[in-house]
């Protein structure tokens, strides 16, 4: 009998991320021992201000990720043969408690980090990033963030009556010191602001904004080179909101904004981050009910794979 890649051994009715082994969550934090990366679903979209449905993304991304094979042709690494990855299931979210959801997310990410593994998360809306960053900063200290997004996500709660909706996570993260001065790199920004203060707020923290127009002028490779140089060898978290892409490439999102990056540009960006000390990643705002032919779900799975590849490359350096 021919030998199969370990990621092909899983045989069950439920499809794990990338056909990876699953864990017995009844063991608590011990379930993650021995893993180097843990993939988690966070089915929370209670922070959505427009079209809900991102809570269903983890199931759809798992399903389409089964078609992605383990060898990365650009980095020339067998991702799952190099990096011990497991599917940790979905964080159990209380559907009517935003504060409870944040607390449980932080607890789960903390358990992953205590096992010395890297968290890779599929949301959910972008509000899930804040509790993830709280857990990561508690271990690593303030971490740099590369944020792909159409929006700054440094709003206040004034317009929507909630300080923790999906347009606010980076305001909180900066105010709480989870990100160092000059450590937030926002890519693909083009959405309208609530007011001029939103831009000014980020500027006070030295936030670097690489808007869609700048990317058009300089080219994505040039922008990616700038970001990679700025990151150096410091711990970095990747937060990828799929509305950072043009809706032609990612129609399945609740807040689409025309004029975004192409799928190819986003892959170039991620691949150019080779050598970055990635300490975690999220892919958020995939709304399956708005998707077309799984385009957005497949893109989300590919983004995860690219992030895992960066972690795998770091293991073999």
Image: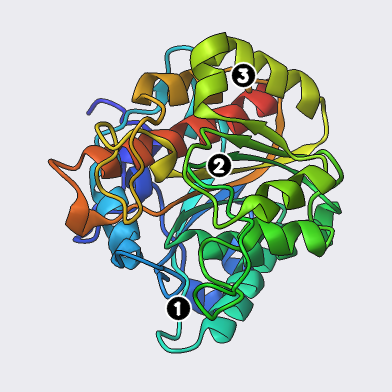
Callout 2: 10 Å neighbours few (<14), some, many (20+)? some
Name the disc covering residue 84, or none.
2
| Left or right, residue 107 beside residue 94 | right
**Alpha carbon distance from label 3 to label 2:** 28 Å
Residue 121 image position (x, y, % from top left): 50, 54
**Alpha carbon distance from label 3 to label 1:** 36 Å
Q: Which badge, 2 or 1, is on the more N-terminal residue?
A: 2
Depth-wise, is mark 3 or mark 1 nearer the camera?
A: 3
Residue 249 image position (x, y, % from top left): 28, 32
Image point 49% across, 73% down: which residue? 25
**Picture layout, residue 18 above or below residue 102:** above
Residue 264 image position (x, y, % from top left): 38, 19
**Picture layout, residue 10 above or below residue 91:** above
Q: Which badge, 3 or 2, is on the more N-terminal residue?
A: 2
**Alpha carbon distance from label 2 to label 1:** 24 Å
Give the quarter of the image for residue 312: top right
The quarter in which the C terminus is drawn is top right
Q: Which residue is the site of mark 3?
A: 224
Residue 294 image position (x, y, % from top left): 19, 42
Depth-wise, is mark 2 or mark 1 nearer the camera?
A: 1
Disc 3 element? helix
| Left or right, residue 293 beside residue 212 | left
Q: Which badge, 3 or 1, is on the more N-terminal residue?
A: 1
Disc 2 element? loop
């Amino acid at each position: 009998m021919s030998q199969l890649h370990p990621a092909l051994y899983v045989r069950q009715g439920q499809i794990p991320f990338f056909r990876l082994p699953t864990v017995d969550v009844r063991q608590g934090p011990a379930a993650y021992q021995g893993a180097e990366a843990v993939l988690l679903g966070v089915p929370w979209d209670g922070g959505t201000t427009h079209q809900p449905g991102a809570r269903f993304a983890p199931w759809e991304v798992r399903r389409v990720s089964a078609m992605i094979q383990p060898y990365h042709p650009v980095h020339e690494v067998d991702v799952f043969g190099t990096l011990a990855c497991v599917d940790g299931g979905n964080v159990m979210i209380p559907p009517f408690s935003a504060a409870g959801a944040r607390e449980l997310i932080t607890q789960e990410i903390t358990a992953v980090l205590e096992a010395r593994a890297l968290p890779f998360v599929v949301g959910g809306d972008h509000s899930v990033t804040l509790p993830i960053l709280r857990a990561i900063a508690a271990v690593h200290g303030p971490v740099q963030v590369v944020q792909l997004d159409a929006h700054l996500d440094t709003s206040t709660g004034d317009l929507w009556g909630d300080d923790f909706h999906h347009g606010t996570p980076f305001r909180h993260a900066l105010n709480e010191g989870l990100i160092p001065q000059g450590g937030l790199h926002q890519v693909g920004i083009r959405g309208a602001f609530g007011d001029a203060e939103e831009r000014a707020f980020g500027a006070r923290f030295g936030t670097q904004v690489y808007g869609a127009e700048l990317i058009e002028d300089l080219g994505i490779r040039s922008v990616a080179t700038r970001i990679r140089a700025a990151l150096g060898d410091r711990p970095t978290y990747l937060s990828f909101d799929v509305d950072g892409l043009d809706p032609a490439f990612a129609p399945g999102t609740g807040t689409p904004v025309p004029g975004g990056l192409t799928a190819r540009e986003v892959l170039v960006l991620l691949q150019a981050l080779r050598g970055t000390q990635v300490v975690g990643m999220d892919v958020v705002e995939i709304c399956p009910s708005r998707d077309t032919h799984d385009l957005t779900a497949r893109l989300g799975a590919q983004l995860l794979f690219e992030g895992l590849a960066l972690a795998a490359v770091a293991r073999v350096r």
